[in-house]
Image: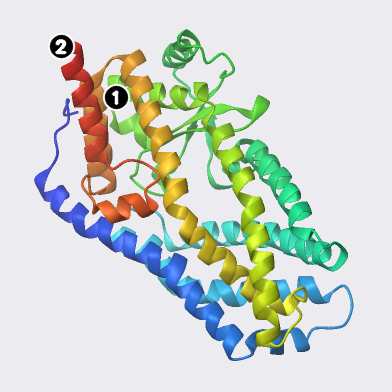
């Protein structure tokens, strides 16, 4: 294994095109497509029609929701398939078969349908019963997010990955020792996820709440990175753990949900009469989603900013405690080449939607840290 790793110039050129295509795809399928579709669906009376053919009574809301979610996912499907399967294979980043992709798609769709069905039925029930529905909905939303975060490592992650304890006992103990020495006492298992059956991309994550907290390392990281490099990744993850970043992210979301729902309430009340439906009838669902999508888009730079700050702090933690800046730089370069990440993406894209600082910035952080130490 080449170490320390240096950038492959050919991959750097491809990374520019690849990253920009992914960014544009994200903006089109995550923002433009839903905004255009939802607006057209409302404007041309699609929502009124769909609501009118629903049966009377309690079934109307869940049935409308299911129909509408299916229509919405069909609208998203072509670009989603292109971006996550065709384009990934074009660049030899995916190792997934078409069947494997379809299975993942079915599972994630089912999960999001189930979650959305419960959430939307709940919201429209609250709307019909309480003046301050958004306050109640916000509180229930927070509880649901907490439960999902808690269940994620034990229920959701295993749906997509085969998770196995790290077999190499000596190495496992070494990793746990690093965690303990750094003060992360609550971590007692290191799990390996079989990402290699999906892609060549390496990653590690720290997930869970309370007693489900654990470190998950992708086999693509374990197999293609040196031990020094993996140490810096673990240092970074322990940094997240000790900085309580999962809790911080959760609290941010918990604070933001109330004004978002309140604003949605105001918009529903203003625009629903114009469009010919009651703001709290299920026909308003596309308007609800449109408002929610627009508000989230406006909030994206803020949440990305907070996320990037937490990532930088975790990088600094790794530098200060693992003290292997050369390995940390090598990791960044290897990760960027492996996943075809542009290490110097356009600034606007970084400010708008990057949850992590671009690799170029993370490398510079480590280089600056080294220079400071040398003085
Ligand atoms: Zn991180």
The chosen color scheme is rainbow
Is residue 230 at least partly visible in the picture?
Answer: yes
- Mark whose residue sits in front, 2 or 1: 2
Callout 2 secondary element: helix
Above or below, 217 against 324 in this view is: below
Q: Quadrant of residue 211?
A: top right
Report if residue 91 is visible in the image: no
Considering the numbered disc 1 on the image, is that residue within a helix, a strand or a loop? helix
Q: Is label 2 in contact with label 1 (beta carbons under 8 Å)?
A: no
> N-terminal of the two: label 2 or label 1?
1
Q: Which quarter of the rendered picture does the N terminus lie within?
A: top left
- If the image is split into quadrants, where does the C terminus sit? top left
> Pointer 2: residues within 10 angstroms few (<14), some, or many (20+)?
few
Relative to 48, residue 197 above or below: above
Residue at 58% in and 84% down: 41
Confirm or reject: label 1 Cβ below 8 Å from ligand 1. Answer: no
Callout 1: few (<14), some (14-19), or many (20+) C-alpha neighbours within 10 Å? many
Return the x and y of residue 325 as percentages of the image width and height: 24, 20
Using the rendered view, name the quadrant where residue 127 is placed: bottom right
- Asked whether 146 or 168 is in front, the reply is 146
Q: What residue did someone put label 1 on?
A: 229
Q: Identify the residue shown where x is 22% and y is 44%.
A: 343
Which x, y percent locates residue 146? 68, 40
Left or right? Give the position of 98 relative to 358.
right
Where residue 279 sits, quadrant-wise, is bottom right
Of 51 and 4, which appears nearest the observer? 51
Q: Is residue 208 left or right of residue 51?
A: left
Residue that badge 2 annotates: 374
């Amino acid at each position: 294994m080449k170490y320390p790793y240096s950038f492959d110039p050919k991959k750097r050129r491809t990374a520019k095109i690849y990253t920009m295509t992914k960014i544009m795809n994200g903006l089109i399928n995550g923002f433009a497509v839903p905004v255009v579709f939802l607006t057209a669906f409302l404007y041309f009376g699609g929502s009124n029609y769909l609501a009118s053919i629903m049966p009377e009574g309690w079934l109307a809301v869940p049935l409308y929701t299911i129909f509408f979610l299916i229509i919405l996912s069909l609208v998203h499907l072509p670009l989603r398939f292109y971006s996550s399967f065709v384009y990934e294979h074009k660049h030899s980043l995916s190792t997934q078969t078409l069947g494997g992709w379809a299975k993942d798609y079915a599972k994630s769709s089912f999960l999001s349908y189930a979650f959305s069905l419960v959430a939307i039925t709940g919201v429209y029930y609250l709307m019909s019963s309480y003046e301050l529905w958004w306050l109640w909905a916000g509180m229930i939303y927070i509880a649901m997010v907490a439960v999902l975060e808690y269940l994620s490592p034990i229920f959701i992650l295993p749906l997509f990955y085969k998770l196995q304890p790290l077999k190499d006992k000596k190495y496992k103990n070494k990793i746990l020792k690093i965690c303990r020495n750094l003060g992360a006492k609550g971590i007692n298992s290191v799990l390996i996820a079989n990402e290699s059956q999906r892609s060549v991309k390496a990653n590690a994550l720290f997930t869970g709440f309370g007693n489900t907290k654990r470190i998950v390392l992708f086999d693509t990281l374990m197999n293609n990175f040196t031990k020094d490099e993996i140490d810096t990744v673990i240092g970074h993850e322990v940094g997240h753990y000790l900085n309580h970043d999962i809790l911080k992210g959760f609290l941010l979301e918990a604070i933001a949900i109330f004004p978002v729902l309140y604003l949605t309430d105001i918009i529903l009340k203003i625009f629903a009469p114009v469009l010919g439906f009651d703001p709290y009838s299920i026909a308003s669902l596309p308007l609800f989603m449109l408002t929610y999508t627009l508000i989230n888009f406006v909030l994206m730079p803020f949440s990305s900013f907070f996320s990037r700050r937490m990532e930088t702090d975790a990088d600094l933690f790794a530098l200060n405690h693992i003290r292997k800046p050369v390995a940390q730089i090598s990791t960044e370069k290897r990760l960027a080449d492996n996943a075809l990440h542009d290490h110097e993406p356009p600034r606007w894209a970084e400010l708008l939607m990057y949850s992590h600082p671009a690799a170029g910035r993370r490398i510079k952080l480590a280089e600056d840290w080294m220079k400071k130490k040398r003085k």
